[in-house]
């Protein structure tokens, strides 16, 4: 269970699906609970996102996980998430370099 909630690395598909699930669950719960609870839940998700979604994705892409703190900056967070969705995994980068040297 721990590795499912707090993974060491995430590929692009896993990152996108987890972000979508978090958003849908947050909106669904927001319609059912009082405003103050929704606000606390939103703050928790805002903290969960950069630490437990962006950091593993950056690690998978071969970048330092500390760059996940960029997700906490308003307006820049949207750009960072879009970049993380399209950033190739380090394994894909290595395999494409091997293919180029083989030809």
Image (cartoon, rainbow, N blue to C red):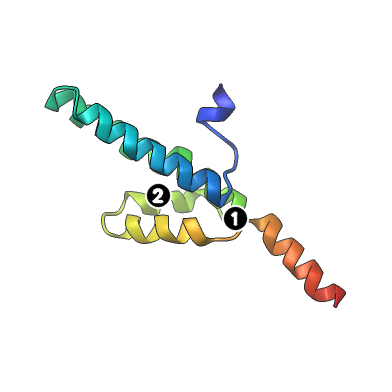
Q: What residue appears at the point 32 percent right and 60 percent down from the top-left corner?
A: 76
Q: Is residue 102 visible?
A: yes
Give how far across and how far down residue 53 sits, in percent: 47, 42
Label 1 or label 2, whichever comes before in sequence order: 1
The dot on residue 69 is 2
Q: Secondary structure at mark 2?
A: helix
Q: CA distance from mark 1 to mark 2?
A: 16 Å
Q: Residue furthest right?
A: 102
Is 7 rendered above or below residue 78? above
Tell which of 14 and 80 is nearer to you: 14
Is 68 rendered above or below residue 95? above
Indicate which label's residue lies in the foreground, 1 or 2. 1
Tell which of 56 and 32 is nearer to you: 32
Is 29 rendered above or below residue 87? above
Q: Secondary structure at mark 1?
A: helix
For the C terminus, the quadrant is: bottom right
Q: Is residue 43 visible?
A: no
Give how far across and how far down residue 27 sits, in percent: 26, 35
Is 87 rendered above or below residue 45? below
Give how far across and how far down residue 13 sits, in percent: 54, 48
Residue carrying label 1: 61
């Amino acid at each position: 269970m721990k590795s499912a909630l707090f993974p060491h690395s995430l590929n692009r598909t896993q990152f996108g699906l987890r972000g979508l699930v978090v958003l849908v669950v947050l909106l669904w719960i927001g319609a059912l609970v009082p405003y103050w609870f929704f606000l606390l839940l939103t703050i928790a998700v805002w903290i969960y996102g950069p630490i437990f979604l962006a950091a593993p994705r950056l690690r998978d892409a071969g970048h330092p996980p500390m760059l996940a703190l960029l997700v906490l900056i308003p307006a820049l967070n949207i750009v960072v998430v879009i970049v993380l969705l399209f950033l190739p995994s380090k394994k894909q980068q290595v395999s494409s370099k091997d293919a180029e040297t083989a030809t």
